[in-house]
Amino acid sequence: GAGVSQTPSNKVTEKGKYVELRCDPISGHTALYWYRQSLGQGPEFLIYFQGTGAADDSGLPNDRFFAVRPEGSVSTLKIQRTERGDSAVYLCASSLMGLAGVGSTDTQYFGPGTRLTVL
Amino acid sequence: GENVEQHPSTLSVQEGDSAVIKCTYSDSASNYFPWYKQELGKGPQLIIDIRSNVGEKKDQRIAVTLNKTAKHFSLHITETQPEDSAVYFCAALYSGGGADGLTFGKGTHLIIQP
């Protein structure tokens, strides 16, 4: 079946602009995660949704970053007043269930990412 | 919070030889340890994972071992092939409530020499 998809694949913007990044999780997955990956580093956790609610947003770096998942499926990561330091690949992942489940229900599957460049 | 250290940062092996990548974690409550393979321009792909109730898991040429006492886990790839060349990440998670974000190591660039 279809995996996690993310759009756009690349986004170039100017400092100070607003951007939205979209994630379509695997159908039926209730848990959705956003990560940020800087060059040469591992992904860093940003926020986790269980259904429509943000269960853990402890990884969001500041209040310029916000994410929504209004219908419990597609999610949008929103970045206001972008800064050059926001340049990175933004990854989305989904899992069948976010909390400890039976077997591999908490296994996270990643999308291809959106490469954000802030000039 | 959790901290994951991964070594080496770069590993070059001859085709057909074995490769071993090691990780340590700091939070003794962590109970889920996946390994991801990432090719250039792509998202991380899960290759194997292990939970804290087992010490070893194997899937064809790939195996993972876990030492809970030492808070250490390793990825073993045998009979390496050119298509194994990629960046490999280990990660750790306490899957049971609270934060469910994975904590990743910094990655190992595996190079398979023909």
Image: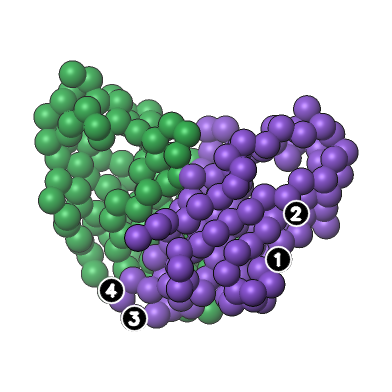
Chain colours: A purple, B green
Give the secondary structure at mark 3.
loop
Q: Nearer the viewer, residue B5 or A31?
A: A31
Q: Residue at x 82, y 53 (%)?
A: A64
The residue indicated by pointer 2 is A78
Q: Which sits earlier in the primary sequence, circle 1 or circle 2?
A: 1
**Front position among marks 1 and 4:** 1
Give the secondary structure at mark 2.
strand
Q: Are marks 4 and 3 in contact (CB under 8 Å)?
A: no
- For badge 1, the amino acid type reads Val
Number of the label disc, if any, that sits on residue B53: 4
Residue farthest along the top direction in this orientation: B114
Residue farthest along the front direction in this orientation: A1
Quarter in which the N terminus of chain A is drawn? bottom left
Image location of residue A113, percent across then percent down: 54, 45
Look at the image and tell me whether residue A77 can be seen: yes
Above-or-below relation of A10 to A35: above
Identify the subunit bearing mark 3: A
**Front position among marks 1 and 3:** 1
Q: Which sits earlier in the primary sequence, circle 2 or circle 3?
A: 2
The residue indicated by pointer 1 is A68
Above-or-below relation of A19 to B111: below
Q: Are marks 4 and 2 in contact (CB under 8 Å)?
A: no
Real-space CA distance between mark 4 and mark 2, rounded to the nearest whole angstrom: 39 Å
